[in-house]
Amino acid sequence: MATVGQACLILALATCAYGIGASLYGASAGRRDWVESGRRSVYALAVLATAAFAILIAAFLRSDFHFTVVATHSSTTTPTFYRAAAAWSSQEGSLLLWVWLLSLWSSLVLFLVRRRLRDVAPYATAVLLGFGAFFTALLVFSVTPFHTVASAPAEGTGLNPLLRHPSMMIHPPMLYSGYTLWAIPFAFAIGALVVRRVDADWIRATRRFALAAWFFLGVGILLGARWSYAELGWGGYWAWDPVENASLLPWLTGTAFLHSVMVQEKRGMLKVWNVSLILATGTLAILGTFLVRSGILDSIHAFGASTLGVPFVSLIGVMIAGSVALIVTRRASLRTEHRLDSLLSREAVFLGNNLVLVGLAFVVFWGTFFPLISEAVTGEKAAVGPPWFDRYTVPLALVLVLLSGIGPVIAWRRATLANARRNFKWPIVAAAVTLVALIAFGVTQNVAAMTMFAVAAFVVTVVGQELVRGVSARRAMANEGPARALVSLVSRNRRRYGGYTVHVGMAVLFVGVAASTAFQHARDVRLSPGQTAAIGGYDVTYTNATARADYRGDRLERVNLGAVLDVKRKGRHVTTLRTERGYYPSTAAFASGSIVQGIFEGEATSEVGMKAGLTHDLWTAIRPDPEYLNKVIDALAAKTKGRSVDQQFTAVGNLLGVYRQGAFPAQFRLISSPLVTWIWLGGIVVFCGGLIALWPAPDAARRRATAGYAGRVARELGRA
Amino acid sequence: MDVLAPLIVIVLLAVVVWLVSGPLRAGASATEDPDVGRREDLEAAKEAKYREIRDAELDLRTGKLSEGDWRVIDRDLRAEAMELLRRLDELG
């Protein structure tokens, strides 16, 4: 089937090339048939990419080691659940995933707008097929996933153990869905600029896709954070790592875009800003795709160095140059229709929110690329760490959360002082009460965290107040009960109340971030069984060592050395934590016949011991002391040298027994961190809000009335 | 498999050619009335305008807009909606 897969890719490339030509010719010559044919090329691309992707996934599920990519990224010992994920752990598979997702979203948007934006759509089609052509060309000429060997190896290298986590099944497809979905508004913005139709029509046609991009990218980022917290063994969820930052950049500019387009829709303002934002977001999405695998920046998430630097940098260069040229040559069409009436207006708040978000994006971009910048200027690669990022992002995040509370209750065009007083009274009271309560309980160590708690209280009260007023208005209008009125209110105004829900979720999430950063206790301690360490008011005792081996069939998959820890607070038992370090024997060790020696020469992962709660997380990860362990391993390896596999497995069993019985010391990272769970809960609320905003509104009444226009407007509004 | 693979590729090629060349085979005359596209655009603009009118009304009811400000905004938005209806009717 590799031949069919490769043929699908070649056909896909040819289809993209044809579709670009047909769309551009159709648009310039006014030939609908050619435009239509170009649009169908996108559907054909979807069919071909789906077939190619299915062939690759089937090869991984079958462990068909004739496929080089399967042999180098999977193995028969890789659990079936993770074999499909192994497809996108490879560079080839991830690029194919990109093309597949792009082809699906492109087909969907072009189907939905098949009778709309007839002047813009052909150019958008050409841009989308341009992306398709770029990625399929890479897959055909540089990194084909369908390279095969005549003689398949008996066993594959296996999936990187760090990626064997449920989040990793979903995290990359979510990120890539986000990246590819940003290509949709990007392409339509280019189309709108080309034909100089820069009103809000292209924004309305692609708004749901922009929202979906924001949603999926956000889910991907949060899953990545969760994976980092639960799997990487360092105890944090965000390290300002280049790959993490690369996904955050388009999310930040995309969030700014989702807010500022409302100003263009309502007031015809910020046209240059909006097209600039979406063109930047599309470009940053490509940069994010590239950075994950480029190896140009050191990252804990980089799983291989790419050979695709030149094509990617060229594409990014073309995107930037093309975007700038289009905006400059269309600046007359992009002139604003209105001016800002007042600084006390929603437009002004959205502008402020945009400046903060773009400011955050600039800080993240500068910090991420600083090693390259410093190397270019001074010749030395210098990196900036989390304290540098925190210095700038903390105040910006505070302002951002505050603005997310002000925005919902301030009027478009001009708010009066009387309205402002009425709308801000209770939120300000809630923020003040929170501050007083924090001071009363002695939580005064960190001013930034205290401010964040107060600002979050402000936001939650604003949204609560909005819901109460909306429900009251709805009840007065429709004579409904409170629950029914709430459902009606939200379902009739999904974009508004979905957005408010997102704001509440972000406030909760930032409370979790502020608390877990400011009030975290962390210690690295070396303990032997029976010894105790104190952390954040808890006494943690290393009770006993654990050791076991996992076999898949007759193959040794992993050796786990761990610990059981008893946690007490003021002498009372709180919980028991179990943590392990998993060692995956290297394939080379098996090949050389020295299984005992090879156990610790492969990849290693941490199984975190965690007691998560609404108020506190207790977190620990073990690293067995190599000094003691190596002595035992060397002795066993010497004894079993040249012995049969069975005898070596017996030696592994002996090693585990010795570890369990012996009083080997181990290194533990202990963390007591408040409100981490609020980050995940806040994330869930954010994405519930995103879903509410994304959910299609009920079909508006489209029946035509025969009476006068004013009466028709009133009647149709009443029906919807 | 050696025989099957070329067959599958030929079938895929045929499907792609059939799918993509459909509009060209039907010719320019078979494509839709250009007014259909304009009507869809105007319908979308009308729905967006209605949404703005409802938003303004909700802003009034939740205390973000004063009665006077709302009247001005609502009158402007309804006039724009009526203009869109007129243009839709012109298309027949």
Image (spheres, helix red, strand yellow):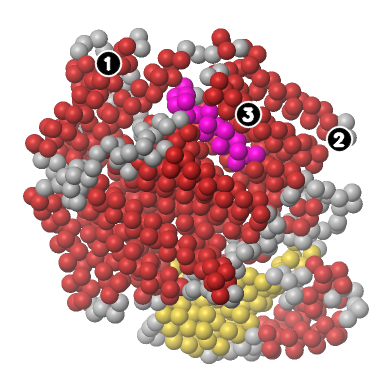
Query: Which residue is drawn at the image coordinates 32% and 67% (left, top)?
Result: A395
* Disc 2 target residue: B1
Mark 1 vs mark 3: give the one in front: 3
Mark 2 vs mark 3: give the one in front: 3
A140, A238: nearer the viewer: A140
Mark 1 vs mark 2: give the one in front: 1
Query: Which residue is drawn at the image coordinates 37% and 35% (left, top)?
Result: A333
Q: Answer few, some or many: residues within 10 Å of disc 1's Cα (few below 14, many 20 plus, some between 14 and 19).
A: few
Q: Which residues are magenta?
A: A115-133
Q: In terms of image quadrants, where is residue A574?
A: bottom left
Left or right of residue A454: residue A149: right
- Secondary structure under badge 2? loop
Q: Is residue A563 above or below residue A297?
A: below
Mark 2–mark 3 CB contact (< 8 Å):
no
Query: Which residue is drawn at the image coordinates 74% and 37% (left, top)?
Result: A10
Name the spot of residue A286 as percent of width and height, x first: 56, 50
Question: Are dots 1 and 2 on a single chain?
Answer: yes
Label 1 vs 2, first from the N-terminus: 2
* Disc 3 target residue: A21
Query: Which residue is drawn at the image coordinates 82% and 58% (left, top)?
Result: A155
- Write down the chain letter for disc 2: B
Give the total number of marks visible in the rendering: 3
- Write down the chain letter for disc 3: A
- Secondary structure under badge 1? helix
* Disc 1 target residue: B86
